[in-house]
């Protein structure tokens, strides 16, 4: 059985997480050049694990959580440490940290309100018919007939959708959106 390397991007992310403590220690010891070297190494490893995950299709759910967590933890730690030392104004650190808080909160709200995470079937949960090797066979799909779905070139059909998004200040659903190609 050939060795599988799909764990490598996640291992690189874990190394990047482990680099946070030495970077903070070097900043506190005022060894800025060494800290910069580790930060540059972390940036290179971020690019490398992203490339490996995309190029070889080694994307995992764990990696999609570890990668941004490692980035945000490193940025947060560096800014807080530099502000503590008086090298970066506190308001700059607050802006950077609040930016990341808004991004994480937005991603969490998106997952909670719009696209909940779908877990893979477990051994206990019935998963339907499985192909040899453990992969799930694709479900049979029916193709619509050409007459049942008009194309954009035949007739301008108005599109009306109800947005699943809510207005954050009232938690009321967003207004109905109506669009027709003839309005463009």
Image (tube, rainbow, N blue to C red):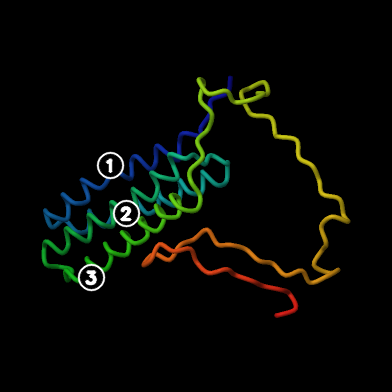
19 left or right of 90 in image: right
According to the image, label 3 marks what residue?
Answer: 92
Where residue 80 appears, as percent x and y from the top left, is 18, 59
According to the image, label 2 marks what residue?
Answer: 72
64 left or right of 98 in image: right
According to the image, label 1 marks what residue?
Answer: 18
Q: Residue at x 16, y 56 (%)?
A: 27
Where residue 58 appears, as percent x and y from the top left, is 53, 39
Viewer-nearest of labels 3 and 1?
Answer: 3
Where residue 41 appears, as percent x and y from the top left, is 34, 51
Closer-to-camera residue (27/169): 169
Instruction: Name the quarter where the C terminus is drawn.
Output: bottom right
The crowd level at tag 2 (other Cα within 10 Å; few <14, some 14-19, many 20+) is: some
Per the image, label 3 sits on a secondary structure element best described as helix
Q: Earlier in the sequence, mark 3 or mark 2?
A: 2
The crowd level at tag 3 (other Cα within 10 Å; few <14, some 14-19, many 20+) is: few
Q: Earlier in the sequence, mark 2 or mark 1?
A: 1
The crowd level at tag 1 (other Cα within 10 Å; few <14, some 14-19, many 20+) is: few
Q: Residue at x 40, y 47 (%)?
A: 67
CA distance separating discs 2 and 1: 13 Å
Q: Earlier in the sequence, mark 3 or mark 1?
A: 1
Name the mark on residue 124.
none
Per the image, label 2 sits on a secondary structure element best described as helix
């Amino acid at each position: 059985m050939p060795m599988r390397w799909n764990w490598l991007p996640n291992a690189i992310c874990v190394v990047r997480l482990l680099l946070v403590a030495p970077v903070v220690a070097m900043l506190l010891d005022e060894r800025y050049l060494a800290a910069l070297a580790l930060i540059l190494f972390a940036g290179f490893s971020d690019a490398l694990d992203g490339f490996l995950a995309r190029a070889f299709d080694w994307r995992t759910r764990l990696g999609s959580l570890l990668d941004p967590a490692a980035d945000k933890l490193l940025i947060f730690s560096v800014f807080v440490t530099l502000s503590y030392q008086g090298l970066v104004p506190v308001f700059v650190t607050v802006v950077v940290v609040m930016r990341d808080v808004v991004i994480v909160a937005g991603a969490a709200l998106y997952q909670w309100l719009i696209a909940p995470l779908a877990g893979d079937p477990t051994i206990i949960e019935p998963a339907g018919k499985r192909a040899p090797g453990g992969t799930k066979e694709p479900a049979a799909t029916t193709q619509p007939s050409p007459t049942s779905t008009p194309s954009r070139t035949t007739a301008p059909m108005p599109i009306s959708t109800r947005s699943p998004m809510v207005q954050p200040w009232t938690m009321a659903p967003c207004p109905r959106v109506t669009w027709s190609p003839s309005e463009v």
